[in-house]
Amino acid sequence: MRIIILAAPGAGKGTQAEKLSQHYGIPTISTGSILRRNIQEGTELGKLAKQYIDGGNLIPDDVMIDVMKDRLAQPDCEHGFILDGFPRTLTQAEALSASDIVIDAVLNIDVADEKIIHRLGGRVECSKCGSTYHKEYNKPKRDGICDRCGGALVTRADDKPETIQSRLDIYHQTTEPLLAYYKEKGMLRTAQGQEEVADTTAEVLRVLGD
Ligand code: ATP
Ligand code: MG
């Protein structure tokens, strides 16, 4: 199974990607995690990525396409993958279409902007393992501490209110047109985002025909 998850920032892509990854037994390839790991490790890619990410802007297409070509060629992707965060532009989508990778379905998780602003505003992330929590909807057992690894929970630099709005604007301008692109190809499945993570997962599996 090769699935692309296409949804606005904060629509729950990452969370649902993890659920699908467990369900199908295939890895999630998350561009955000790859980039943030490179930033932490201070690699050349990380240095370049940081200036774009912190401002809520996209990394240049040629860089992103190279990173993903390498990643999807790794042996763990052989039996399928869930793509979280790629493609995000028409140029990236066309590069993927032109490759020999055959995508089975493109999943859209539909969530209204107002909800997204509220969700991202309350999101915190583990500085060590990257697990995400929400100050209202998905609280850690102990305030400010990761349930999974005990790491400190922090607000991502790109989850500041001004940056959230610019990420949403970029999504509408640059990524949303991909919905029409994949719809035309007959690949698009749309799930309505629900209040509860588990309800969204049920809806996602339903639209994927599972
Ligand atoms: P969410 O946490 O809901 O997934 P998001 O999708 O905005 O929110 P990430 O996927 O973690 O966040 O991506 C973080 C940042 O990494 C983006 O704002 C962008 O700067 C950069 N990025 C990630 N994927 C791509 C891509 N395919 N092309 C260009 N830049 C990207
Ligand atoms: Mg993401």
Image: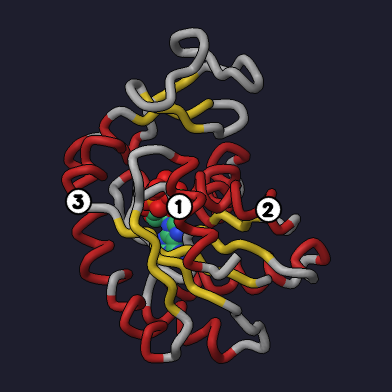
Residue 182 position, x and y percent, is 41, 83
Q: Which is closer to the viewer, label 2 or label 1?
A: 2
User: Closer to the N terminus: mark 2 or mark 3?
Assistant: 2
Secondary structure beneath label 3: helix
Q: Nearer the viewer, residue 54 or 32?
A: 32
Q: With respect to residue 53, does 172 lie above or below?
A: below
Residue with the most extreme right position = 75
The answer to whether the beta carbon of the residue marked 1 is less than 8 Å from any atom of ligand 1 is yes
User: Closer to the N terminus: mark 3 or mark 1?
Assistant: 1
Q: Residue 172 vs residue 62: left or right? A: left
What residue did someone put label 3 on?
A: 113
Disc 2 crowd, CA 10 A, few/some/many (<14, 14-19, 20+): few
The answer to whether the beta carbon of the residue marked 3 is less than 8 Å from any atom of ligand 1 is no
What residue did someone put label 1 on?
A: 13
Residue 156 position, x and y percent, is 38, 33
Whole-number angstrom distance, CA of label 3 to CA of label 1: 14 Å
Residue 26 position, x and y percent, is 73, 58
What residue did someone put label 2 on?
A: 23
User: Closer to the N terminus: mark 2 or mark 1?
Assistant: 1
**Amino acid at dot 1:** Lys
Q: Quadrant of residue 58?
A: bottom left
Q: Which mark is residue 158?
A: none
Q: Is residue 52 visible?
A: no
Q: Is residue 113 visible?
A: yes
Q: Residue 49 vs residue 24: left or right? A: left
Residue at horizontal 46 percent and vertical 77 percent from the top: 92
Q: Are marks 2 and 1 in contact (CB under 8 Å)?
A: no
**Amino acid at dot 2:** His
Q: Which is closer to the viewer, label 2 or label 3?
A: 2
Secondary structure beneath label 1: helix
